[in-house]
Amino acid sequence: MIKSHKNFHSQNGKRLILIADDEMINREMLGNLLSADYELLYAEDGEEAFEKILRYHEYLSLVLLDIMMPKMNGLELLAQMKKNPSLGQIPVIVVTSDQKAEVDCLGLGASDFLSKPYPRPEVILARVVRTIELSEDRQIINATERDSLTGLYNKDYFYSYADQFDQYHKDYKMDAIVLDVYHFHMINDRFGNAFGDEILRQIGLRIRESVSIDGGIVCRKEADTFMVYCPHRDDYSDILEHAAVGLSGTGSVSGWLRMRMGVYADVDRSLDIERRFDRAKMAADSVRNNLRKNIGIYNEAMHETEMYSEQLLEDFATAIQEKQFKVYYQPKFDVRPVVPVLTSAEALVRWQHPKLGLVSPGVFIPLFENNGLIQLLDKYVWEETAAQIADWKKRFGISLPVSVNVSRVDMYDEGIIDLFESIVKRNGITESELHLEITESAYTQDSEQIIGVVSELRKRGFHIEMDDFGTGYSSLNMISELPIDALKLDMLFIRNAFKKGKDTRLLEVIIDIADYLSVPVIAEGVETEEQLNVLKTMGCDMVQGYYFSRPIPANEFDAFLNDRKKQIELEGQSYSGFSRYNPSKKEIVFGKITHALSAGFDYIYYIDTDNHHYVEFSAQSSKESPKIERSGLDFFEDMEKNAELLVYNPDVDRVTRALRKENLLNRLSSAKSFCMVYRLNKNAPEHFSLRAARANTNDDHHIVIGVNKIDEHSEAG
Amino acid sequence: MIAKNVLIGFGANPDEGIERCMGDESFYLKLVCRAIERGPFEKLLDAITGNNLDEAFERAHALKGVLGNLSLTPLFDLSSELTELLRNKLGGYEAPAKKLIEKRDELAALLSGLG
């Protein structure tokens, strides 16, 4: 929004002018002169003028300012206005008989002067009109060159002003600095955007205060990131400390908000300006998550990393051409049979660089993800993998599905579905042989788009695995609706669960969830026999990791296929893979549950009486498509707590007793089901009906409890 | 018209003052009457006799601005002279201050004589 649009006073469409003069006669003379064409405000001292400027700054087109005024003189007022970017844009005509003050006023940003005694009215009017016109033209330029929130330069203009600075100050040593706020989004989330905006304004203002004295310029690059280009200094802490006052002045957020800063000192002017700030950003990233240090300085080590990255980027095209990228395969085993069965593999890329040797994917994948090359690499890996699947099929007569990683950016490619189709056709394999791993975070970041693409891929027969499960933030509800064929537990998740002070409870819940969703769980990163055995006990279906094999080149992988071939020859094709999983399994299980209870319930709990884990389904929105609401580790403990909190006092004891494990199992040993009515809500009791039954599934250790609200007159507690 | 002639006779330039008031003569005369009211001139003299020279300078400067805008030339000239004396701290303020009041009284008498 261009500010000049606001300069019209809302009621009569006239521009608003403030006349600040302590002499009433002067105010009246100017008022008489201007009132036909302008809306007027008056102030009789400096403080009143400043207060009105603050209040009306969005609408003020001009201030006519007397210099000699009580409380705050005109020079002090100008200085105050200059400090505040949103006030500094308002043009000021200084009215004075003191010519000596004119130089000071110009330095403080006055636009023009009027002498006393006043010149002829036409002269005053013409100057007023001209000053407002010039200011509005400038504001139009400002609107494009400045960030409307902070009044700082926007990125493009900042870069061109920095260039200009270089041209006119060729001998200066210059620094490029980047500042940002840790977890700034949390401020907006917790306190609202208006509060967050105010903090950004304060930070911007303070950074400018610190660096503008030396001629430094500042811009807000985006969100909470600021850039500074200023003459070289030795100590940067004052800039950071002064900027951080913008945070500490905000009371409730002080303490947990921190800023960090990256400095590329004494910049190399042969680099283009954006590169200089890339280096400052790199320096800022070097202190990420470092509680003791919040200023990073670009150094030789960073320079080497940068050069290394640059070389990798430069060599990418040749590497694709010369097939320097090697696809390695890591086997996945079904661990449910006594002897684990090789069921598939994951394709993992390695770079055999002619000069640098084996480059870690941990280095080049994030790099390629940042600049879009990852799509080309993914495509390369998919092609290689499909060809390998076909080769193994031909040589061993075994169809071994292989999963490939699909980057998030691939999912936005409109041609992705056709591309996969053409890859499988070209290589003579089927859709079901190419498994696609899509990371959990992709689903959560733009779920609608991703779910649409994934659903279509599944419809075509591709098998979808949700990768890195446990690192994203999927809600249970969302997971139950996602089109997936397997959940892959993140490697770190496994490692953490088995770390010192082993805590595998969360792992168990996730495996339970997968079970209820009727999708197999694939555990990645399994390294030891202990991990394997615990995971098996929990019900994990497939395992991948160093315990079986590290990722290996295709030729070495032949050994696994040979073994599998021998296994088949010995046992026949008895292994049926994951046939127990089919898309409708979830509905079947749920059908059996509701059948056990004669259906019609609002909430259903599916409880494992061995380990007490449970899942709560809600059927409120659709009886046919129940949703998982939550899951828990101990049904009986949770129910006891909830009864205390939620059940109507006179019924608490009865409900608590009935839902004790031994009582419940006792009742169900003598009857097919058990029913009770009780009241919820302490203040306005409502009647609920609860029915418990043994699950009508093949196991005998699950019970099902259904709850629904009933008409209060039909049955009484 | 009579008032204007009185002002001309006093040495003022009412046409210039009226022009600053967008040709509104009665508005101009109203401002002239207000400008020569008792108060500001006396306070200026008090500040001088009390040796509050900063205050005196501010008051003289303020009067100068108003009197100049109304083109009350004899008063403007005196207030200008006094302002410069005070600005440069040259001393001898009391005589011109008193003269300024006398001249103001003279104009007030002329105007009040018009009824």
Image (cartoon, coloured by chain):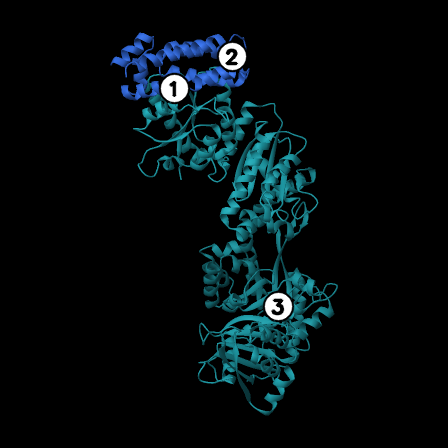
Nearer-the-camera pick, A639 or A672: A639
* Alpha carbon separation for disc pair 2 and 3: 92 Å
- As drawn, the chain in blue is B
Mark 3 vs mark 1, foreground winner is 1
Question: Dot 2: few (<14), some (14–19), or many (≥20) neighbours within 10 Å?
Answer: many
Task: Tell me the quarter of the picture where residue A42 sits.
Answer: top left
What's under tag 1, amino acid-wise? Answer: Glu
Depth check, front residue: A410 or A352: A410
Same chain for labels 2 and 1? Say yes or no.
yes
Which numbered marker is on residue B86? Answer: 2
Mark nearer the viewer, 2 or 3: 2
Quadrant position of residue A314: top right
Cβ–Cβ below 8 Å for labels 2 and 3?
A: no
| First in sequence: mark 2 vs mark 1 | 1
Q: Determine the secondary structure under disc 3.
A: strand
Which type of secondary structure does the marked residue at label 2 adopt? Answer: helix
Q: Amino acid at mark 2?
A: Leu
Spatial CA distance of label 2 from label 1 is 23 Å
The secondary structure type at the circle numbered 1 is loop
The residue positioned 54% from the left and 11% from the top of the image is B89
| Mark 3 Cα-neighbour bin, 10 Å: few <14, some 14–19, many ≥20 | many
Mark 3 lies on residue: A522
Q: Circle 1 is placed at which residue position?
A: B37
Q: Residue at x 53, y 29 (%)?
A: A163
Image coordinates of residue B53 in percent, x first then y, are: 54, 16
| Residue A347, percent from left and from top | 60, 60
Read off the chain for label 1. Answer: B
Label 2 resides on the chain identified as B
Q: Which chain is cyan?
A: A
